[in-house]
Amino acid sequence: MNQPFVLALLRNPRQIGAVVPSSQSLARAMAIAAAPSGKRILEIGPGTGAITKALLAEGASPEQLCLLERDDRLAAYLTRKFPGVRVINGDARSITDTIQPKAHSYFDIVISSLPLLNVKEADKIVILEQIFSLLDQQGLLVQYTYSAKAPISPSLANRFGVKGERTAMIFRNLPPASVWKYRYFSYRDFQN
Ligand SMILES: C[S@@+](CC[C@H](N)C(=O)[O-])C[C@H]1O[C@@H](n2cnc3c(N)ncnc32)[C@H](O)[C@@H]1O
């Protein structure tokens, strides 16, 4: 049993949006999709850190990683678990206020475990506006979903000028999940 996860689930099931943490297979597929080495990465909704661990294993260094987690106890847990990684206890609906970067183009990659299926459409738009404001034209959003459909509808993706691509389906996860990458239409190497 993953105690921090179960306690968070009991506190706020809708916000957690999953019954168990991401499996090692899903975490690895997310990290491979991100190709994190040498990139500045914002991870949103890291939960208990399964994907964080995979990002570090795939070559990210702790200083490149910034974790944004809304649940305060999970944020404290992540701080203890990943020394050297910046952990912010905050809400994805107000990322730019929370992070206080020279906000624009601040990250190369945003990797998200947000349970977008549970997020109201208006909140989803606010979150995506913020995410894409933090990425430059070469930026990448990696997101998984338990749905057969894309985590961001094609019409919403169009609104942000991005295109989605499913890069992996992971059956060794409860429930099975697929990994999606989003990039701006203008990015020529999208197939890579
Ligand atoms: C599906 S769980 C992540 C599971 C994670 N991959 C793991 O293996 O533990 C989703 C996470 O997103 C966080 N979350 C949900 N809404 C959020 C928001 N608006 N801002 C930041 N984090 C949020 C939840 O607290 C939860 O930790």
Image (cartoon, rainbow, N blue to C red):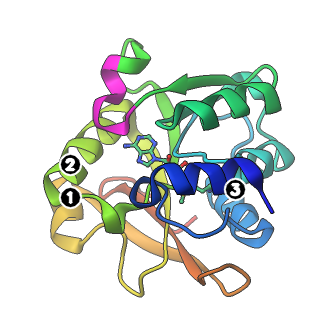
Q: Nearer the viewer, mark 1 or mark 3?
A: 1
Q: Earlier in the sequence, mark 1 or mark 3?
A: 3
- The residues bearing labels 2 and 1 have C-alpha atoms spaced at a distance of 5 Å
Q: Could you say which quadrant of the image residue 165 lies in? A: bottom left
Q: Is residue 168 left or right of residue 180?
A: right
From the viewer's side, name the closer residue of 151 and 122. Answer: 122
Q: Earlier in the sequence, mark 2 or mark 3?
A: 3
Ligand 1 has an atom within 8 Å of the beta carbon of the residue at disc 2? yes
- The residues bearing labels 1 and 3 have C-alpha atoms spaced at a distance of 27 Å
Marks 1 and 2: in contact by CB < 8 Å? yes
* Label 1: few (<14), some (14–19) or many (≥20) C-alpha neighbours in 10 Å: few
Which percent across, then down, holds residue 128?
28, 47
Going by the numbered disc 3, the residue's amino acid type is Ala
Q: Could you say which quadrant of the image residue 79 lies in? A: top right
Q: Which residue matches tag 1?
A: 120
Q: Which residue matches tag 2?
A: 123
- Residue located at (22% from left, 55% from top): 161
Going by the numbered disc 1, the residue's amino acid type is Lys
Position of 10 relative to 18 (above/below): above
- Residue located at (46% from left, 63% from top): 17
Helix, strand or loop at mark 2: helix
Q: Which residues are magenta?
A: 91-97
Q: Is residue 169 visible?
A: yes
Q: Nearer the viewer, mark 2 or mark 3?
A: 2
Going by the numbered disc 2, the residue's amino acid type is Asp
Helix, strand or loop at mark 3: helix
Q: Which residue matches tag 3?
A: 31
Which percent across, then down, holds residue 19?
59, 70
- Residue located at (45% from left, 24% from top): 106
Q: Is residue 159 left or right of residue 171?
A: left
